[in-house]
Amino acid sequence: MKKPIYLYILVGLSLLLSLLGIYATMVPSTPKSAAAYEGAGIPEDVVKQLVDYTAKNSEFVQNPLNKILAILSLIVIIAALVFLIRKNIVYANLTYLAYLVISIIGIAYSYIGASSLLNVLDAQYRELVSGGLLISTVVMLVINLIFLGLVLYKFMKQQKELEKDELG
């Protein structure tokens, strides 16, 4: 059986993303204050909205469920890496598929949670931020679904090869 290069690449990229997710949820970030926007020519009411939104977003990113999802995804991707190193490709594929499912759940949760924060913005900025949020969510979801399709395709192909080897 060939080396699953695709899986090494996907697991490596996903490990980096999981580490970034752990950092974002575990390390407290300080939201920008109104002073950070001074001299930028932004109206005072907009600055207040931005400060409120970034503060609430920071709280949301570090809530317990986000922390659980980040830790769980890191554990699962490390398990996939261990299976990959031990050349147990079947389990590596299955654990990576589990990681992708967790990622998709995390994307949906992030979208729902971030959408609920939009009420601190006025209608104009809410529409702008909502559009950006929707675009980023769709892009992340499409990428995860492509990864899911690729891994499922390769996994099914490997299973057929194994069956053929057992029969032949």
Image (cartoon, rainbow, N blue to C red):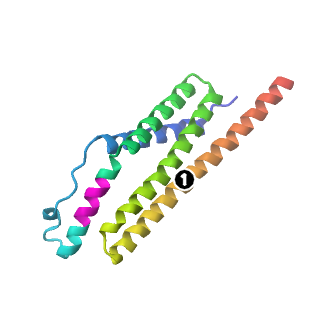
For the image, the number of numbered tags is 1
Q: Which residue is mark 1?
A: 143
The residue carrying pointer 1 sits among few (fewer than 14), some (14 to 19) or many (20 or more) residues within 10 Å by Cα, namely few
Magenta segment main secondary structure: helix
Measured as percent of width and height from the top left, residue 22 is found at 36, 40
Question: To which quarter of the image does residue 163 belong?
Answer: top right
Determine whether, in the image, residue 50 is placed left or right of residue 154.
left
Q: Residue furthest top?
A: 86
Q: Is residue 121 above or below residue 58?
A: below
| Residue visible at 24% across and 48% down in the picture | 29
Determine whether, in the image, residue 85 is placed left or right of residue 151.
left
Q: Is residue 154 above or below residue 139?
A: above
Residue 29 visible in this rendered orientation of the protein: yes
Q: Is residue 5 above or below residue 150?
A: above
| Residue visible at 13% across and 68% down in the picture | 38
Say which quadrant the N terminus sits in.
Answer: top right
| Residue visible at 25% across and 44% down in the picture | 28
Measured as percent of width and height from the top left, residue 142 is found at 56, 56
Q: Nearer the viewer, residue 164 or 36?
A: 36
Q: Nearer the viewer, residue 6 or 56?
A: 56
Determine whether, in the image, residue 73 is placed left or right of residue 45.
right
Magenta span: 50-58
Determine whether, in the image, residue 22 is placed left or right of residue 100.
left
Question: To which quarter of the image does residue 71 belong?
Answer: top left
| Residue visible at 22% across and 63% down in the picture | 51
Query: What is the secondary structure assignment of the residue under circle 1?
Result: helix
**Residue 97 drawn in magenta:** no
Measured as percent of width and height from the top left, residue 103 is found at 50, 46
